[in-house]
Image (tube, helix red, strand yellow):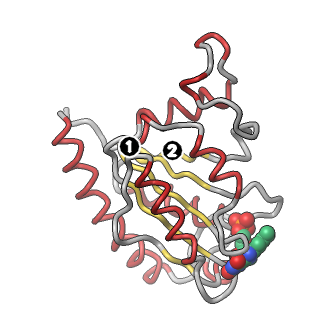
Amino acid sequence: MKKKLKFAIIYGSTRRKRLGIRLVKYLHTQIKKRGYNSYIIDPLENKLPLLDKRFDDFPKKNIPTAVKNVQKLLNKSDAFILVSAEYNHMPPPALINLLNYYYIEFNRKPSCICTYSVGDFAGVRVQGPLRSLMTQLGSPAIKYGFFQPKLLNKFNENGDPINKKDAIERFNLFFNELLWYTSSLKKAKN
Ligand SMILES: Cc1cc2nc3c(=O)[nH]c(=O)nc-3n(C[C@H](O)[C@H](O)[C@H](O)COP(=O)(O)O)c2cc1C
């Protein structure tokens, strides 16, 4: 049987009452609906200390559980979907901290940067830094993403969109492109 592609959704916010989790939930649901595996990597659930050693630099028997758990998910994923807001025009610190723990896990797998805001600009200013970072990690970003301004009015707490048609159009646009890169790069590696 053909193996299902696996997608890791990497979220950036650790704030109480955070809003981006709504978009995370929506993406997770849609990916599973399409018949693929989806894992949410949430820095609030996997509390990684501020970076001291990268995953590879820990003695094998002494790796903190959260660091190990995230590594397993990244390692088995075929592509990465980052979900990020702008904090003062930059990505949230927990997202940068988490990504820098790992390296080889990203290699030659595509990524996609999805951004949101409560205001009008959908957090697009973090596209630049996150694209540079993911490229340096060996996981270049595709051209499309899910860009959501006014998130608070567009998704409820369960991650259900207020306008289903609009949301699925935005989802399909980037996800179809990401699927192409994910399956092509996976085939090229095997
Ligand atoms: C520290 C901080 C800085 C922010 N800076 C920006 C910003 O530069 N641009 C923007 O559009 N929104 C900014 N916002 C508003 C965020 O878009 C909004 O709070 C969003 O809900 C953050 O995502 P989260 O709830 O998932 O943490 C900022 C919010 C915080 C907490």
Q: Is residue 62 above or below residue 2?
A: above
Q: Position of residue 136 (x, y in %)?
A: 43, 51
> Callout 2: few (<14), some (14-19), or many (20+) C-alpha neighbours within 10 Å?
some
Judged from this view, the residue extending furthest toward the top is 61
Q: Residue furthest bottom?
A: 120
Residue at point 71%, 42% (across, down): 45
Q: In this figure, what is the number of numbered marks?
A: 2
Is 2 above or below relative to 173?
Answer: above
> Where residue 181 appears, x then y in whole percent?
25, 56
Q: Quadrant of ligand 1?
A: bottom right
At label 1, counting other C-alpha atoms closer than 10 Å, the crowd grade (few under 14, some 14-19, many 20 or more) is many
Q: Which residue is mark 1?
A: 6
Residue 112 higher or lower than 95, as above or below: below
Residue beneath label 2, please? 39
Front residue of 189/116: it is: 189
Please tell me which residue lies in front, 128 or 37. 128
Q: Quadrant of residue 178?
A: bottom left
Residue closer to the observer: 116 or 168 = 116
Which sits earlier in the primary sequence, circle 1 or circle 2? 1
Q: Secondary structure at mark 1?
A: strand
Please, what is the three-letter code of the amino acid marked with disc 1? Lys
Relative to 173, is 47 on the left or the right?
right
Which quadrant does the N terminus fall into? top left
